[in-house]
Amino acid sequence: MMDRKQLTFLLVGLAVALVLAGIVSFYASSSPDGLEKVAEDKGFIDTATQHATGDGPLADYGVSGVDNERLSGGLAGVIGVGLTVVIAGGLFLGLRAVRRRTEAGGDRPPTAVGGAPGR
Amino acid sequence: MHIPDGFINGGTSAGAGVIAAGGVAVSLRRSADVLDDKSAPLAGLVAAFIFAVQMLNFPVASGTSGHLLGGALAAILVGPWVAALCISVVLLVQGLVFADGGLSALGLNITNMAIIGVGVGYAVFTVLRRMLPANRSGVLAASAVSAAVSVVAASAGFVVQYAIGGAGSASVGTVTAAMLGVHTLIGVGEAVITALTVGAVLSVRPDLVYGARDLAATPLLAPSSGAL
């Protein structure tokens, strides 16, 4: 089981991520990033084609329909952190479950399974 | 560093897709062997944290910005196999939901940032840990240098892809010089953010830093010895 210290750490970490994506991101530089800048300078930026989800509701880290830039970007960031934690968390908890099942029903003799107390 | 659709031709993108799929498959298998009750939730948090910090572009030169890639950071915190999955999930969410990084370029981006970035970052970190003293400063120095190198390596991944199937007409030499130059600067930012983050986690929960497990076992850094 997860102890309280661990839970506290995870919740504080998640709060930090939400603050960074929801609030601090507004102050991020809006200049092109390294690759974009090189593509502009070296004349291949126009080889980029329209993104398949370029008209999506959260495209380019903004919520379509929300005009306030700070709110739009902040909401997009919070949604992104939420989606990432759900997908990644689900994946990793699922993979951990696979390991447990393998340990419990695997080829190993029962003594080996007994070697992992608390599981 | 997120490649949009169109920069690299379809064949090269598909080839990178195969490499990315192979890397993710191996990472899934290896991660299933190592994830436990403690590391699985932490790994989810690492992915979310990297998504958040990737939004924080910092200026590096006139009219240019960079942001954390997080490959070395994730590898140091949760190990290389789980880290590759963390970065892949971040890239998937960014590409699908936020239109950041082309969908046809997902394989290119996973190859550069999740496989090369994590792999090179972790390899450099491991070598430096062996050469540097086994203490907090050693871990932080190894974190910083490996983070910087991982960004330059990821940008070199793009250069190789551009050389094979770039749609632009600029020469490979010009693009190489420009990409490696600007990503050396971005690597400095990556080094600072990575060392700060690893340092923060080491201060509160040294046992949660995969790349410093050896230190958590020594009394000096044990959580119970508060004074130090």
Image (cartoon, coloured by chain):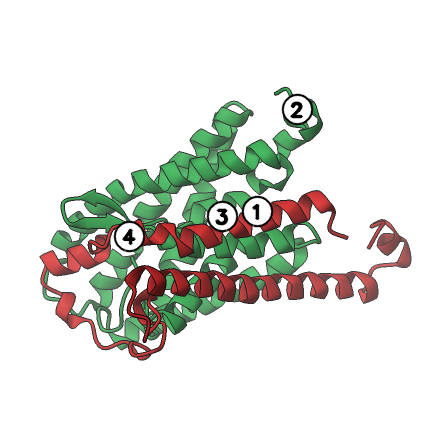
Q: Quadrant of the N terminus of chain B?
A: bottom left
Residue B90, picture quadrant: bottom left
Residue beneath label 1, please? Answer: A12
Does the residue at mark 3 contact the one at mark 2 (Cβ under 8 Å)? no
Q: Position of residue B221 (x, y in %)?
A: 63, 26
Residue drawn at x 14%, y 53% is: B173
Please tell me which residue lies in front, B35 or A84: A84
Amino acid under disc 3: Val
- Residue B50 shows which numbered tag? none
Residue drawn at x 32%, y 40% is: B189
Residue A65, picture quadrant: bottom left
What crowding class fits label 3: few (fewer than 14 Cα within 10 Å), some (14-19), or many (20 or more)? Answer: some
Determine whether the residue tagged by mark 3 lies in a helix, strand or loop: helix
Which mark is in front, 4 or 3?
A: 3
Q: Position of residue A12 (x, y in %)?
A: 57, 46
Q: Chain of mark 4?
A: B
Residue beneath label 2, please? Answer: B226
Amino acid under disc 2: Gly
Residue beneath label 4, please? Answer: B155
Q: Chain of mark 1?
A: A
Please tell me which residue lies in front, A63 or B128: A63
Does the residue at mark 4 contact the one at mark 3 (Cβ under 8 Å)? no
Determine whether the residue tagged by mark 2 lies in a helix, strand or loop: loop
* Chain in red colour: A
Does the residue at mark 4 contact the one at mark 1 (Cβ under 8 Å)? no
- Residue A16 shows which numbered tag? 3
Gap between marks 3 and 2, in whole Å? 23 Å
Q: Is residue B27 above or below residue B119?
A: below
Residue drawn at x 55%, y 54% is: B45
Please tell me which residue lies in front, A99 or B194: B194
Amino acid under disc 1: Val
